């Protein structure tokens, strides 16, 4: 993966992989759909990645940071020494 790819590219690729896995295992998967950049009700904030269960309810959300970006190292309150690779 090139180090100049944006978070959007990485998340889009991850969604494609997840969609393929869900489709391949649809009858046994607890998941139904993956969505990108979903807004939180009553807020302008967005979740990078949202996974829905078979009932269409949110069961997993994610914030993605690429390690080569300025904000890729997770050195924030509540996250000690984290780094995504």
Image (cartoon, grey):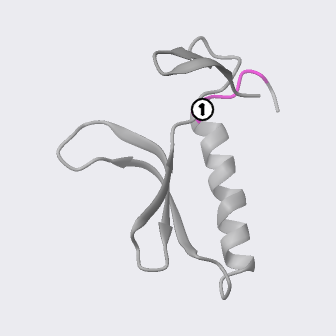
- Find the residue positioned furthest to the left: 42
Q: Position of residue 62 (x, y in %)?
A: 52, 44
Which residue does the image show at 61% across and 47% down from the upper left? 12
Query: Looking at the image, which is closer to me, 1 or 51?
Result: 51
Q: Which residues are magenta?
A: 3-7
Residue neighbourhood size for the residue with mark 1, other residues' Cα within 10 Å, grouped as few (<14), some (14–19), many (≥20): some
Q: Position of residue 80 (x, y in %)?
A: 59, 17
Which residue does the image show at 66% across and 88% down from the upper left? 27
Q: Quadrant of the C terminus?
A: top right
Query: Looking at the image, which is closer to me, 34 or 2?
Result: 34
Q: Position of residue 11 (x, y in %)?
A: 61, 43
Which residue does the image show at 47% across and 67% down from the upper left? 52
Instruction: Name the quadrant containing residue 72.
Output: top right
Main secondary structure found in the magenta portion: loop
Q: Is residue 59 left or right of residue 69?
A: left
Residue that badge 1 annotates = 7
Q: Considering only vertical position in the picture, is 13 above or below 59?
A: above
Q: Is residue 72 left or right of residue 1?
A: left
């Amino acid at each position: 993966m090139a180090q100049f790819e944006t978070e959007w590219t990485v998340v889009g690729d991850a969604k494609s992989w997840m969609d393929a896995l869900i489709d391949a295992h649809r009858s046994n998967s607890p998941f139904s759909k993956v969505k990108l950049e979903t807004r939180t009700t009553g807020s302008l904030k967005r979740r990078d990645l949202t996974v829905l269960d078979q009932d269409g309810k949110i069961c997993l959300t994610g914030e993605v940071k690429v390690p080569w970006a300025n904000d890729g190292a997770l050195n924030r309150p509540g996250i000690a020494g984290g780094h995504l690779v």
